[in-house]
Amino acid sequence: MHYITRNNSQAPIIQGIADHSWQARGLCHNMPPKVIDALFFHASRNRSAIDEAKTICGKCPVKKACFDYALDNEIRHGIWGGLTEDERRPWHRKVAKRLDYARVKAAFAGRDVHLSDAEREAVTRHAYVRGWSPERLAYALRLDLDWARDLMRNAAHAVADRDRYWDQAEEDQAADETPEDDEASPVQVPRQVQTDSLIAALRKAA
């Protein structure tokens, strides 16, 4: 595992799953292999080694990238992103349900990231309301075209269900606010208003 600290790439921007350039910016990058083994792959319950490693990780500029790397690659042993194996265990268990909008935004920017099911669904819905084609989604997520079409179809149903729910909610609210002796009927919010609002919210989230 020593290649992790011997990467000589100086590129400052992560381009995809196979890009390890962030590792060159880690504070542990130039440490001797023996020191790395002693600190980050320490013996069980070696509290002094754990504390020293956590101190280094706490100041590291690529702490989050290190943590994500361990989760994405199912690395259970050692300290990654400032967390021990025991501390990362709950994150490994729920990684399939992770929803990190920074990763959703990275996918839209063209990065090839390990998306969870929830993150892929967020990307798909955002792509649908933006008017993306299944071909564009397939390219962005590195998916089979038929799979991308299925995802877009599911997103269309989800957005339609959401719009129906909010339309009904607006009608119910208007009915509750209208006096019984007032003959004015509630005004339904146009579907386009809901869609524009959703797009704005998604852009802000991403």
Image (spheres, rainbow, N blue to C red):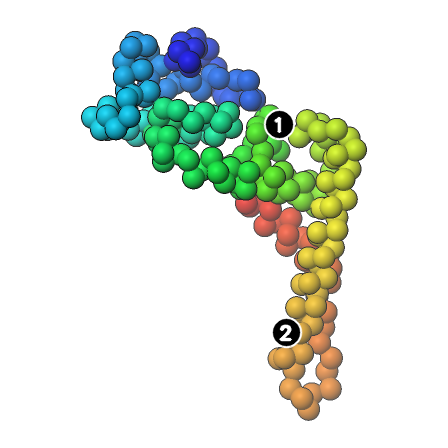
Q: From what the image shows, is residue 52 above or below residue 101?
A: above
Q: CA distance from mark 1 to mark 2?
A: 42 Å
Q: Is residue 159 left or right of residue 34?
A: right
Answer with the quarter of the image where residue 178 lies: bottom right
Closer-to-camera residue (135/3):
3
* Residue sitting farthest toward the left: 48
Residue 152 horizontal/vertical position (percent):
74, 41
Residue 168 visible within the image? yes
Q: From what the image shows, is residue 79 above or below residue 92?
A: above
**Which residue is under mark 1?**
110
Q: How many marks?
A: 2
Residue 108 horizontal/vertical position (percent):
62, 33
Q: Is residue 13 left or right of residue 193?
A: left
The residue under the point 47% across, 35% down is 92
Query: Which mark is drawn over residue 173?
Result: 2
Q: Is residue 40 left or right of residue 188?
A: left
The residue under the point 28% across, 25% down is 44
User: Secondary structure under badge 2?
Assistant: helix
Closer-to-camera residue (179/58):
58
The residue under the point 69% across, 63% down is 165
Answer with the quarter of the image where residue 96 lies: top right
**Amino acid under label 1?**
Gly
